Amino acid sequence: MNPITYVLTTNGLLFLLSVIFWKFPPKKINNIYGYRTFKAMQNDDIWKFANSTFNKNFLIYAGISFLAALILATISVQELTWQPMVLVMLSLLVSIIKTERSLSDNFTEEGKRK
């Protein structure tokens, strides 16, 4: 597979999803769409905060992942196999960790603002 096509279908798709999540965040707590963890679904205030924080982080790190994968695809002399997928997983993992830390810093375990 062409390396640019591979990057567009993995990291490009991730970036497109991050733009969609950022542009159209979920309005109400649901089990289908949005940042869904036990803590994020405790109340509406946490839900909105968690989704806005995750969407912002996700957009940033998906964009970095996309650019890094494009650069890697253009300068790499060997075939890309797992590298773009690692960038996808890292961007998701970093976004989740930063969101959970932000939730812990701003809300108590009972769901009240600190």
Image (cartoon, helix red, strand yellow):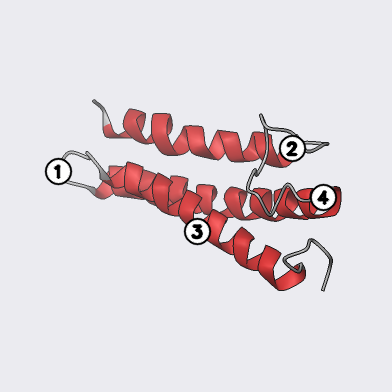
Q: Quadrant of residue 101?
A: bottom right
Residue at image point 22% right, 40% down: 80
**Is 6 situated left or right of 30 in this image?**
left
Q: Answer above or below: position of 34 versus 60.
A: above
Quadrant containing the C terminus in the rendered view: bottom right
Q: Decide: marks 4, 1 in contact (CB < 8 A)?
A: no
**Is 43 situated left or right of 16 in this image?**
right
Residue highlighted by disc 2: 23
Say the numbered circle drawn on residue 43.
4
Of residue 51 and residue 38, the one placed in the foreground of this image is 38
**Is 35 situated left or right of 67 in this image?**
right
Say the numbered circle drawn on residue 94.
3
Residue at image point 38% right, 49% down: 87
SS assignment at label 4 = loop
Camera-side mark, 4 or 3: 4
The amino acid type of the residue labelled 4 equals: Asn
Name the N-terminal-most of marks 1 and 2. 2
Quadrant containing the N terminus in the rendered view: top left
The amino acid type of the residue labelled 1 equals: Gln
Distance from Cα at disc 1 to Cα at disc 2: 36 Å
**Is 28 situated left or right of 63 in this image?**
right
Of residue 99 and residue 3, the one placed in the foreground of this image is 99
Query: Measured from the top left, where is residue 34 in percent x and y?
Result: 68, 38
Q: Quadrant of residue 9?
A: top left
Name the N-terminal-most of marks 4 and 3. 4
